[in-house]
Image (cartoon, helix red, strand yellow):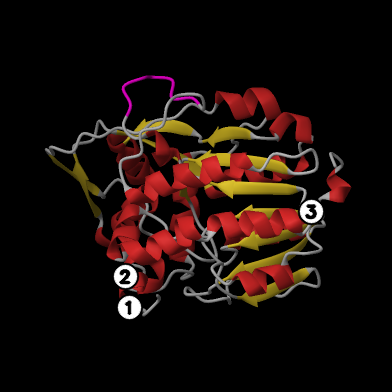
Amino acid sequence: MNNIKKNKNIFITGAAGYVGSVLVPRLLSEGYSVTAFDIMIYGQNVLKPHPNLKIVKGDIRDIKILKELIPGHDGVIHLACISNDPSFELNPKLGKSINLDAFRPLVEVSVKSGVNRFIYASSSSVYGIREEKDVHEDISLKPLTDYSKFKADCEKILLEFNSSDFTNIIIRPATVCGYAPRQRLDVVVNILTNLAYHKRIISVFGGEQLRPNIHIRDMVESYLSLLKSPSKLVKSEIFNAGYENQSVKSLAETVKEVVGEDVKLNYTPTDDNRSYHISSKKIANVLGFVPKHTIKEAVQDLKLAFEKGLLPNSLEDEKYFNIKRMQSIDLN
């Protein structure tokens, strides 16, 4: 099962989300056939028609439709979840049903359907706040919120499924940034860039706190690397994926450099000095995956998107902000 040609039909949950909207066309360009499965609360027009793309609107909690769709696929990439703590905390019961309760049935259906590679998008937030400089994959987990705890729980569930013909992989991404067809403007680099471009001012609370980020194109390439790598290198393995750990102050200064010197940085003291940082040495050493795109490039891409009018009403439109959309729809 190590040959890439045997992993050509990919089922992606959350395929019309932020990362999915870049991952799907990238896989199609590599010759994969993709089933894009998503509840489509942010719209399905982010995915353009393609001969090898099947778009299905559906809920990962619907086991019946999963049993119908997943057979015939070689790989599953599980991106779907209620993302970020505020959105999760808005409706904890909903968050648990999607982020945790639906997970084991999804893996079970995948195994029974003959899927040979399952990639789970966990989160670097499972580590919590650490003093260690080298936060690697073998360090103990200290998730601080239900969102993070359920990510860690799903990792344990996936690692239970261990057979010779099933390759289970966990990836713990840093915060993703940059432009995408389904844009998010509620993550740190994207927030700062949006405010800098339209308001010409950024409020920085504290500034020395570290935040790990990764360019969305690199995030997508990490999934390709996991799909293409021999099973013996990735089976039952966990990989961090980040570019570099930069302070919030450094991120703000990068945004100012790209957007314009007239952008004002307002620094405000804060009691929230939480720093998050991760090491991405393992994925580099084991798979040879090293991010190629800088945070500065992510800011440049967003600036260009604003200039071209690709993100209209970016300060107000709820489609760019997960919690605003969650508040406006009746998902249960």
Check contact, mark 2 vs mark 1: CB within 8 A.
Answer: yes
Q: Which residue is mark 2?
A: 324
What SS does tag 1 mark? helix
How far is the residue under mark 2 from the one under mark 1? 6 Å
Mark 1 vs mark 3, CA separation in Å: 37 Å
The majority secondary structure of the magenta stretch comes to: loop
Of the residues tagged 3 and 2, which is closer to the observer? 2
Residue at image x 44%, y 38%?
Answer: 124
Quarter location, residue 248: top left
Tag shown at residue 30 = 3
Front one among 222 and 316: 222
- Quadrant where the C terminus is found in the figure: bottom left
Residue 1 position within the rendered picture, expressed as x and y whole percent measured from the top left: 85, 42
Amino acid type at circle 3 is Glu
Q: Earlier in the sequence, mark 3 or mark 2?
A: 3
The residue to which callout 1 is attached is 328
Dot in front, 1 or 3: 1
- The amino acid marked with disc number 2 is Lys
Residue at coordinates 37% horizontally, 40% vertically from top-left?
254
Q: Which residues are magenta?
A: 130-136
Res 157 → quadrant? top right
The answer to whether one can see residue 197 in this image is yes
